[in-house]
Amino acid sequence: MTTTTTSRMPRARRAATALAVGVAVLTVTGCQGAFDLPLPGGAPKGGPVIHVTAEFADVLDLVPQSSVKVDQVTVGSVEKIELNGWTARVTMKLPKDVQLPDNAIAELKQTSLLGEKYIALSAPPATAPEGHLGDGDNIPLDRTGRNPAVEEVLSAMSLLLNGGGVAQLKTIETELNKAMNGNEVQIRDVIKQLDTFVGGLDEQKSEIVRAIDNIDKLSAKLAAQKDDLAKAIEALPKGLKILADQRQQLVQMLQALSRLGAVGTDVIKASKDDTRANLEALQPILAQLTKAGDNLPKSMQLLLTYPFSDGTLGAMKGDYTNMSADLDLNLENLLGNLSKSSPTPGGTPTGPGGLPLPTPSLPSLPGLPVQPSPTGTSPTGAICVPGTICVGSAQPSGSSSSDGSWRSLYGGGA
């Protein structure tokens, strides 16, 4: 009955019903796009949301309404994908209360081997989290990435199996067998030498590291002085040009040095015997100087302070010391003292070697007494040696000596 009634429904009524359904569908689709329709398994609806963008070098076949997950939990969805220069900019819609740092990373992953693509958000694994991801933030290209797609893996495997090294394994094995057949001893020796070589390198590892460090330091110093090195290299051609221009003069100078060397060699050879004789003659003198030892410097010190040495300071009592000196200018006595010899029995003085000295008869100088004998005393009672200074035994006026004699010969502060 019902079927018969339905089959007998007027065509006009069926057309009106179909029109009403079509209008309802058009009304729904006019308010929402196909990407706006809720899908099963998507992010929960409701609550405040934020929009975050991410830059990808390649999004593969990612489409709007794809999932956005945090710790494998769907929290949002992809709202829009657009081209930004040479990169793809993906706009994601996330709940406002999502807990992600400001330096979060985004990766394009796949749910399964043949599953759909989705975006996984997480904190950076190598650095500490900073801030909080908010509305309008952007994840730059250096913090995004993707896993290899299944198509890429299959393509690489196909390349390996069809035109890669797998097809050549048989050829490689055959050639290795031919190369090693009959050469086992040599190959074993090579392996042993390699083991020794590698062991030596391992023992000197610290030295190698130290050498590399020193090379690094040298390179750093060279890099710091690269401007000076560049100037030196630029000035080097000019210096080489100057040397090239003066090549003839340099050759002449070297030839002159060669001739000078030859002349010097001849002079040294010719004067060798004389030089040896002079050195041998100097040997006794140097030996006597060596024997003199410390006496020679002391004698030089005494010579500069003659006739008073440091020992005379102990004889100075009081503020000053008087001096009384008698000068005997009799030439006969002077010549006798200089001869350093006693007169001959005949009264004629002799000089060195026993040669007689002339005895001049000279008048006495006016105003000065003539010493009548080789030795005598001065009017003050001083003992005089002819040709020398008389030393008095009586204390002069003003002397402060306590033993009745005076030793210093000239006045001066004590």
Image (tube, grey):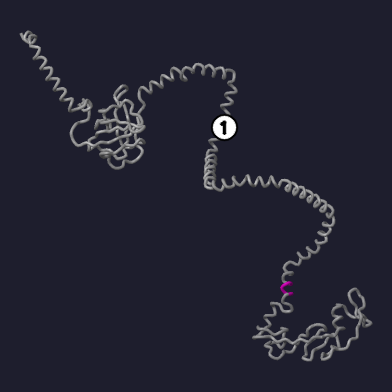
Q: Element under label 1?
A: helix
Q: Give the image quarter of residue 158.
A: top left
Under mark 1, the amino acid is Phe
Q: In which quarter of the image is the N terminus?
A: top left
Where is residue 7 shown, x and y percent of the image?
Answer: 9, 9
The overriding secondary structure of the stretch rendered in magenta is helix
In the drawing, does residue 135 fall left or right of residue 246? Answer: left
Q: What stretch is highlighted in magenta?
A: 299-303
* Residue nearer the viewer, 37 or 401: 37
* Residue nearer the viewer, 23 or 76: 23
How many numbered discs, if any?
A: 1
Residue 73 visible, this angle: no
The residue most toward the front is 12
The residue most toward the left is 1
In the drawing, does residue 210 fall left or right of residue 64? Answer: right
**Residue at left offset 36%, top offset 36%:** 142
Q: Give the image quarter of residue 148.
A: top left
Label 1 crowd bin: few (<14), some (14–19), many (20+), radius 10 Å: few
Q: In this view, does 161 lie above or below 138?
A: above
Is residue 272 in the magenta section?
no
